[in-house]
Image (spheres, rainbow, N blue to C red):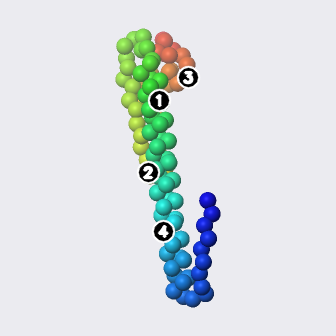
């Protein structure tokens, strides 16, 4: 995507171009925040889908999911007493 900005060498023209750049920067920041949010939502949905297919042999399915952080820096994850065992592939039997 390329854009051409024409201006004259006058104070008012330069100020107008600076304002256009500031508006463009705000739009880029907003787009970045939306991308981060959508990626986190997708990742969280995938995690939830995978855990919903998990069979907890001892019935202890105290699994919780979270999304946290700022608009530009978010984290998703899983909490619960058996998450570590499931993460490394040992399943709920791994703690015995």
Residue drawn 49% across the image and 75% down it = 19
How far is disc 1 from disc 2 in space, using C-alphas? Answer: 20 Å
Badge 4 marks a residue whose secondary structure is helix
How far is disc 2 from disc 3 in space, using C-alphas? Answer: 29 Å
Q: Which of label 3 and label 1 is nearer to you? A: 1
Contact between marks 2 and 3 (CB within 8 A): the answer is no
Badge 3 marks a residue whose secondary structure is loop
How busy is the neighbourhood of tag 1: few (under 14 within 10 Å), some, or many (20 plus)? some
How far is disc 1 from disc 4 in space, using C-alphas? Answer: 36 Å
Kindly identify which residue carries mark 1: 47
Kindly identify which residue carries mark 3: 88
Q: Earlier in the sequence, mark 1 or mark 4?
A: 4
Q: Which of label 4 and label 3 is nearer to you? A: 4
How busy is the neighbourhood of tag 2: few (under 14 within 10 Å), some, or many (20 plus)? few
How far is disc 4 from disc 3 in space, using C-alphas? Answer: 46 Å
Kindly identify which residue carries mark 2: 70
Q: Earlier in the sequence, mark 2 or mark 4?
A: 4
Q: Earlier in the sequence, mark 3 or mark 1?
A: 1
Residue 23's disc number = 4
């Amino acid at each position: 995507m390329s854009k051409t900005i024409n201006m004259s060498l006058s104070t008012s023209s330069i100020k107008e171009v600076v304002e256009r750049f500031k508006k463009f920067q705000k739009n880029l920041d907003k787009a970045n925040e939306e991308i981060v949010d959508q990626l986190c939502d997708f990742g969280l949905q995938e995690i939830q889908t995978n855990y919903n297919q998990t069979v907890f042999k001892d019935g202890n399915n105290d699994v919780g999911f979270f999304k946290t952080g700022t608009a530009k820096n978010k984290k998703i994850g899983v909490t619960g007493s058996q998450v570590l065992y499931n993460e490394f592939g040992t399943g709920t039997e791994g703690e015995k």
